[in-house]
Image (cartoon, helix red, strand yellow):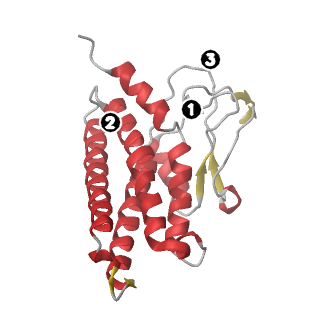
Amino acid sequence: MDFAYTEIQTMLADSVGKFINNEPQARYALTSVATTADRDGDAWVLNGNKGLVPNGGSADLVIVPARTSGKSGDENGITLFALNAHAVGIVQVLKDKTVEYSKNRKQFGVPIGSFQELQHRMVDMLMACEQAQSLLMWSAMTRAADGDNSKRAVSAIKYLIGTEGKKLGEDAIQIHGGMGVTWDLDVAHFFKRLTTICTLFGNADWHLDKLADMAPQT
């Protein structure tokens, strides 16, 4: 159902909110919302099925997209900015923690950060972080300006996070060694969350197809 942005802000102010959008038939199509909402007196009755809800058990408020008119596939105005900002923050933290670890972890009597191969990997991490931050700013600016590139920007950052961001996480785990996959080290938790984000609202391949569809025709 339709809520004003300010109303959603008010509801979330003192609550742990979760956004429930995934439906079994939708795959990555954000507009494929078959759940319906029908007026029943002063209340609404929701009918439909929703799928995965990350950390749903911790929520005391949920936001459920549902149709009050139209059919599945109609535009519903869902955006991904908060999710993308979360992902950009994760890759930045993984990069910083890996660089710091490489300065302190010693092998053969020297910090592993002095090894040229690992230096190359960490330069790639830095480049991925810079690209992600640039795309995030672009997506925010185009959205604020209601520009035609808004959807392209969202798909671009989702593709980057799903490719370069995922590789950054894998490198962070590998450079940390065996400790990198244990729950005792927070990089494992960050990588787990990043892996989930990469599949939510369309994986890298899906958004690459979207970018191809939106490419200017020559």
* Residue 204: image location, x then y, percent: 46, 38
Q: Amino acid at mark 1?
A: Tyr
Residue with the mark numbered 2: 153
Which residue is farthest front? 108
Q: Is residue 108 above or below residue 215?
A: below
The disc, 3 or 2, on the residue closer to the chain's N-terminal end is 3
At 49% from the left and 69% from the top, the residue drawn is 187
Q: Is residue 155 left or right of residue 53?
A: left
The disc, 2 or 1, on the residue closer to the chain's N-terminal end is 1
Question: Element at badge 3?
Answer: loop
Q: Give the mark toward the camera: 3 or 1.
A: 1
Examine the rendering and report whether any part of residue 81 can be seen. Answer: no
* Residue 173: image location, x then y, percent: 48, 66
Q: Is residue 150 above or below residue 53?
A: above
Q: Amino acid at mark 2?
A: Ala
Question: Element at badge 1?
Answer: loop
Q: Quadrant of the C terminus?
A: top left
Q: Amino acid at mark 3?
A: Lys
Residue with the mark numbered 1: 28
CA gap between label 3 and label 2 equals: 26 Å
Q: Mark 3–mark 1 contact, CB under 8 Å?
A: no
CA gap between label 2 and label 1 equals: 17 Å
Q: Residues within 10 Å of mark 3 (few under 14, many from 20)?
A: some
Q: Mark 2–mark 1 contact, CB under 8 Å?
A: no
